[in-house]
Amino acid sequence: MNQHLEAINKTMELFERYSHAVRIMQYDMETICPKEGMEAQGEDIAFFSNEAFKLLKDETFMAEVEAAYKEMDDSWNEFDRAFIRDMYRGQLKSSKITPEMNLEFARTTQKAFADWSRAKEAADFGMFQESLAKVAEKDCKVAALRSEIPELKRDTPYDYMLDDYEEGMTAADLDRIFGECKERLVPLLQRIQASDKKIRTDFLSRKVTEAQQKELAYKVLNYMNYDLNRGAMTTSEHPFTSEMAVDDVRITTHYYDDAFASSLYSVVHEGGHGLFELNAPRENWEHHLANKTMGQHESVSRFYENMIGRSEAFCDVVYDMVAECMPQVVEGVSKKEFYEAINTVTPSLIRTESDEFTYTFHIIIRYEIEKEIMNNGLDVAEVPALWKKKYEEYLGVTPDNDKVGCLQDMHWTEGFGYFPTYALGNMYNAMYYNRMKKEVDIDAAIKSGSLADINAWMCEHVWKKADRQTPKEWITEITGRELTSKDFLDYIEEKYTKIYNL
């Protein structure tokens, strides 16, 4: 092994122990930590995060990374090449950030999460406003520092944040992609709303117990081949997935007694994230690789949630599970009615509860607001009003309180740039879904009793190299084409034209 790489690996072993501890504390904070204990726990998370950061800022370690990057050649295995490339790029990004600054940033985001939790419960944006302003200030400061580094030069402050979640993506790219979405989806939504087709949805709000929902959740996870010897599930305010370790991937959901589909599709979505991590090459851990972008990750979670999970074949399968776990829900309901209800288009306020069609508008709204904050200095005090205005403009609905408005998501407690990756995920997965259709009988695979055949295809074509390729390299190798919105928009148009008899 290269001597520089050997030295780097020794430091990374300690770094990963600190990082593991942070992930455990963060998971606890977002699941069972009492609200009054969150700030103190956040301080501990910030401390240990910064101890890990200090290891990477050690001058000797930084010199080893730079030397390894310069010496790297084709004789190195692809895992080590990807690791060193990622480390060097991360080193450039943090080169102007001191441990003291990093600790301050970590405290900012941890306090923001605690404030957001209380603010959401009280439906009061004012309780979160100061913290959000500090998060925005943090991101703007990071962007300004990175702008001083020639190798990282971007066109706008927001581009620097986007790059943390989706390498190489820019606001100009998103403006084009979202412009194409609006051009095709807005008139289609108007046609759907004018349609005479009436879809029955009354049974979606039939009362269910938490025990019934939990039973259904585990049935679905087993059907997805989510390995419960290496994975776990619990509840949280906002469903998420946490990759703790190579054999420890945890997901969360939530239960509403009058909305069983909310938990069902949270489980399918987060289960998709979990499958991605559980089926990654074990060499990733051996070579300290954790370089999947959020666009790649959201493509997988939303592939399982929508492309598979809202398909007619899957709805047929899950209908039988629902009938077994909560028979009162589907009493007097046909499988066709179930499928159409799961796919009904109803403009609504909550992103995570929205239908597959209108979901893209929820992302566009958040993107446009956070871009305004980063690039044009929008005062965060104006966020609630702008949020309401855009919801009325795009979806014709208006929140009557902040809990169902701009406080519904936790993502802004960390910063800006994450939300667009959900929509990018839709673009990616529609592209590789079209390739999969040529190679796999998808409906037959879904009805086979498990998703093993679909998972095997995903493992070979989508998951295997995600940590070792940039998003552009990855989607091009899978599909032979560069990123486009066309596949997704064609899929949406074909599916909903048929459902609504347009």
Image: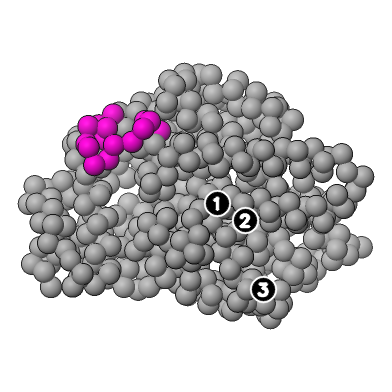
Residue range of the region highlighted in magenta in the rendering: 144-158
Secondary structure beneath label 3 = helix
N-terminal-most mark, 3 or 1: 3
> 206 or 91, which is in the foreground?
91
User: What's the residue type where badge 1 is placed?
Assistant: Thr
225 over 292 or under it: above or below: below
- Say whether marks 2 and 1 touch (CB < 8 Å): yes
Q: List the single residue furthest toward the front.
A: 481
> 369 or 181, which is in the foreground?
181
The colour mode here is one colour
Please identify, in this view, whether the residue under mark 3 or under mark 1 is nearer the observer.
1
Q: Position of residue 354 (x, y in %)?
A: 68, 45
Asked if residue 395 lies left or right of residue 194, the reply is: left
Residue 153 in the magenta stretch? The answer is: yes
Secondary structure beneath label 1 = loop
| Residue occupying image coordinates x 78% and y 69% | 316
Residue 200 in the magenta stretch? The answer is: no
Specify the label residue 442 is tagged with.
3
The crowding category of the residue bearing disc 1, from other C-alpha atoms within 10 Å (few below 14, some 14 to 19, many at least 20), is: some
Q: Position of residue 297 (x, y in %)?
A: 48, 57
N-terminal-most mark, 3 or 2: 3
Q: List the single residue furthest toward the bottom.
A: 448
**How much space separates mark 3 and mark 2, taking CA atoms?**
17 Å
**How much space separates mark 3 and mark 1, taking CA atoms?**
23 Å
| Residue occupying image coordinates x 18% and y 50% | 56
Q: Position of residue 399 (x, y in %)?
A: 68, 28
Label 1, on which residue? Answer: 484
Label 2, on which residue? Answer: 487
